[in-house]
Image (cartoon, coloured by chain):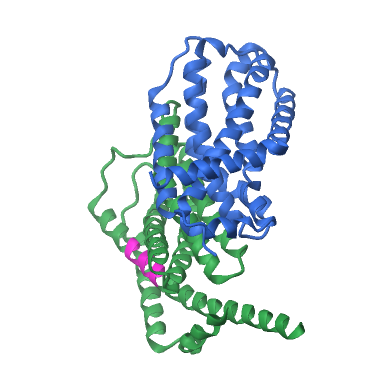
C-alpha cells in the first residue's frame, strides 16, 4: 500500500506530461507504420506468407519502436533536472520506477491498439476471432518490453552514447520475451488458432522475474 | 565531492611491480597448462569416429565450464557491491567478466573448428549454440557499458545492476531457445555416448589448467582495475579543481 499511492500519483504525472504534447506517441506510431511499409518490400505480403512472417515482424517492429520510445523516459527528467526533485520526495524510490514502467506500458498499449487494425488490414490477418487471447499475449509482451526498457533507459541515461546504448543493452536481454511472444502470436494466427500455454507461461515468468529483480535492485539506479 | 580525496592514497601498494608470489603462480599455471596440453594431444586415446579433431574437446569444454564459473563470480560480485559498496567487489566483477568473455570467445571459436569437419557446417542455430552467442553478446554489452560511464562509483552501481539483469536472463534465454529450437531438426550432440575413463581424467586435468588461467588472469586484471579506479578518481578530482580555479 505504501507503494501504491505514490506510484498512482507519479503515474498520473507521467500520463499528463505525455498527453499534453503526445509527441512520444505520435512519433512512435509514425515510426511503426513506416517500418511496416518497409517490411512489405522484403517479402510478398499475401495471406499465406503473412501468416508465416507477420508475428515476428510485429514483435520486432514493436521492439525497435520500444527501444526508441523508452529512451526519453529518463533523459526527459535529466534535461529539466526533475529527477533530483523526485528523489527528494519522501517516497520509496521504487515508486518512481514503477510509475515509469506503468506509464511506458500504457503508451505502448495505446500505440498498439491504434496500430493493430492497420497492421491486420495491411497484412491480411484475422485478428478479431482471437482478439481476447491476443490481448493477453500483447499485454504480457508489452509489460516485458516496458519493464526492461524503463530500467535500461535509467541505465543508458547515465552513460555516453545513450541513444545507441539502449537498444544494445535491451535487445539481447529481451531475446526470451521476443521468442515467447512471437511464438504465442504465431499460434494465434495459425490456420487452426490455438493459445500456446507454454509460451504464455514463459512470458508471464519473464515478467514476474524481472519485475522482482527491478523491485530488488532498481532503486540503486536512481541514486545521486 | 570533498570526500573524493579521502580514499585515494589507500591503494598506494598497488603501484608496486608484480611480486615473487605472482610470478611463481604464473609459472605454475603455465607448467600445468603445458602438461594438460601434452596429455590432451598425446596421452588421451584418439576417438573412434571423429579422429584427431575430437581432441579440441579438451580445450572447448573446460573453457565453457570456466566461463560459467567466471560469470557466477560476476553475479556474486555485483550483488555484493550493491549491498556493501566496497569497490573491491566492483574490481572483481569486471575482472571476472572480462576473463569470462575471453573464455566464451575461446568456446565460440573452438566450437566451429570442431563442427566443420564433424557436422560439415560451421554453425547451426541450435539451442546451445544460440544461447552461447546471446551470452557472449550480453557480457560484451556489460563491458561496453562500463567504458561509457566516467565516474567510477556510478559506473560500478549501474554496471552491477545490468550485470544482475544479464545473469538472471541467461537461464531464460536458454529455456526459450531450447523450447523454440527443439521443434526443428538439429545435429545431435553426443549426450548418450559414454566417456572413456582416461579421457575423463585428461578432461579434468585440462579444466584444472583452465581454472588456473582463470585465477591468474582475474588476479592480474584486478590489480589493473584497482589502479584504474585510482586514476579515474584523480582525473575527476583534477578536472574539478581545474574548473574551480578557472572560475
Residues drawn in magenta: B206-215
Between residue B75 and residue B222, name the one nearer to us: B75
Between residue B211 and residue A18, name the one nearer to us: A18
Chain identifier matching the green colour in the rendered picture: B
Q: Quadrant of residue B141?
A: bottom right
When the figure is inspected, residue B212 is found, relative to residue B136, above or below; the finding is below
Residue B236 placement, left or right of B127: right
State which quarter of the image contains the C terminus of chain A. Answer: bottom right
When the figure is inspected, residue B39 is found, relative to residue B138, above or below; the finding is below
Magenta highlight on residue B233 = no
Q: Is residue A12 visible?
A: yes
Between residue B74 and residue A213, name the one nearer to us: A213
What residue lies at 52% left-to-right and 43% top-to-bottom?
Answer: A9
Residue A40 placement, left or right of A99: right
Q: Quadrant of residue A107?
A: top right
What residue lies at 49% left-to-right and 36% top-to-bottom?
Answer: A177
Residue B83 placement, left or right of B198: right
- Give the percent coordinates (x, y) of residue B184: 45, 26
- Give the percent coordinates (x, y) of residue A218: 47, 53
Residue A175 placement, left or right of B63: right
When the figure is inspected, residue A47 is found, relative to residue A144, above or below; the finding is above
Q: Quadrant of residue B85?
A: bottom left
Which residue extends farthest left? B197
User: What is the number of callouts on the image?
Assistant: 0
What residue lies at 63% left-to-right and 80% top-to-bottom?
Answer: B235
Chain identifier matching the blue colour in the rendered picture: A
- Give the percent coordinates (x, y) of residue A17: 66, 42
What residue lies at 40% left-to-right and 67% top-to-bottom?
Answer: B214
Considering the whole magenta stretch, tell me its main secondary structure. Answer: helix
Q: Is residue A57 visible?
A: no
State which quarter of the image contains the N terminus of chain A. Answer: top left
Amino acid at each position: 500500500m505504501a507503494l501504491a499511492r505514490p506510484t498512482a500519483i507519479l503515474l498520473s504525472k507521467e500520463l499528463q506530461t505525455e498527453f499534453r504534447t503526445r509527441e512520444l506517441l505520435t512519433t512512435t506510431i509514425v515510426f511503426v507504420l513506416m517500418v511496416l511499409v518497409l517490411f512489405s518490400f522484403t517479402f510478398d505480403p499475401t495471406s499465406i506468407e503473412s501468416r508465416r512472417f507477420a508475428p515476428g515482424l510485429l514483435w520486432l517492429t514493436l521492439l525497435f519502436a520500444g527501444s526508441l520510445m523508452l529512451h526519453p523516459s529518463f533523459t526527459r527528467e535529466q534535461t529539466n533536472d526533475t529527477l533530483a526533485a523526485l528523489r527528494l520526495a519522501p517516497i520509496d524510490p521504487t515508486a518512481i520506477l514503477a510509475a515509469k514502467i506503468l506509464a511506458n506500458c500504457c503508451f505502448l498499449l495505446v500505440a498498439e491498439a491504434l496500430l493493430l487494425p492497420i497492421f491486420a488490414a495491411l497484412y491480411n490477418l484475422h485478428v478479431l476471432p482471437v482478439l481476447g487471447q491476443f490481448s493477453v499475449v500483447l499485454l504480457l509482451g508489452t509489460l516485458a518490453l516496458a519493464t526492461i526498457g524503463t530500467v535500461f533507459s535509467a541505465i543508458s541515461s547515465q552513460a555516453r552514447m545513450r541513444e545507441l546504448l539502449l537498444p544494445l543493452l535491451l535487445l539481447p536481454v529481451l531475446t526470451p520475451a521476443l521468442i515467447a511472444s512471437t511464438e504465442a502470436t504465431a499460434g494465434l494466427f495459425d490456420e487452426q488458432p490455438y493459445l500456446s500455454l507454454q509460451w504464455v507461461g514463459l512470458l508471464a515468468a519473464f515478467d514476474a522475474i524481472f519485475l522482482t529483480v527491478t523491485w530488488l535492485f532498481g532503486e540503486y539506479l536512481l541514486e545521486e | 565531492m570533498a570526500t573524493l580525496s579521502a580514499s585515494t592514497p589507500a591503494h598506494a601498494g598497488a603501484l608496486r611491480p608484480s611480486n615473487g608470489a605472482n610470478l611463481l603462480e604464473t609459472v605454475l599455471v603455465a607448467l600445468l597448462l603445458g602438461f594438460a596440453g601434452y596429455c590432451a594431444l598425446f596421452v588421451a586415446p584418439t576417438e573412434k569416429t571423429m579422429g584427431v579433431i575430437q581432441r579440441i574437446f579438451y580445450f572447448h569444454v573446460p573453457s565453457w565450464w570456466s566461463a560459467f564459473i567466471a560469470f557466477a563470480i560476476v553475479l556474486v560480485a555485483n550483488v555484493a557491491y550493491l549491498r556493501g559498496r566496497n569497490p573491491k567487489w566492483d574490481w572483481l566483477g569486471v575482472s571476472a567478466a572480462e576473463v569470462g568473455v575471453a573464455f566464451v570467445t575461446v568456446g565460440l571459436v573452438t566450437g566451429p573448428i570442431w563442427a566443420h569437419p564433424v557436422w560439415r557446417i560451421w554453425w547451426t542455430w541450435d539451442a546451445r549454440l544460440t544461447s552461447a552467442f546471446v551470452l557472449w553478446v550480453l557480457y560484451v554489452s556489460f563491458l561496453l557499458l562500463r567504458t561509457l560511464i566516467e565516474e567510477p562509483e556510478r559506473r560500478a552501481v549501474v554496471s552491477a545492476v545490468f550485470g544482475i539483469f544479464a545473469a538472471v536472463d541467461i537461464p531464460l534465454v536458454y529455456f526459450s531457445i531450447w523450447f523454440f529450437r527443439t521443434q526443428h531438426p538439429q545435429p545431435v550432440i553426443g549426450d548418450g555416448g559414454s566417456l572413456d575413463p582416461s579421457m575423463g581424467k585428461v578432461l579434468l586435468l585440462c579444466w584444472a589448467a583452465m581454472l588456473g588461467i582463470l585465477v591468474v588472469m582475474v588476479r592480474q586484471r584486478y590489480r589493473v582495475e584497482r589502479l584504474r579506479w585510482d586514476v579515474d578518481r584523480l582525473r575527476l578530482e583534477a578536472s574539478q579543481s581545474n574548473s574551480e580555479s578557472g572560475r
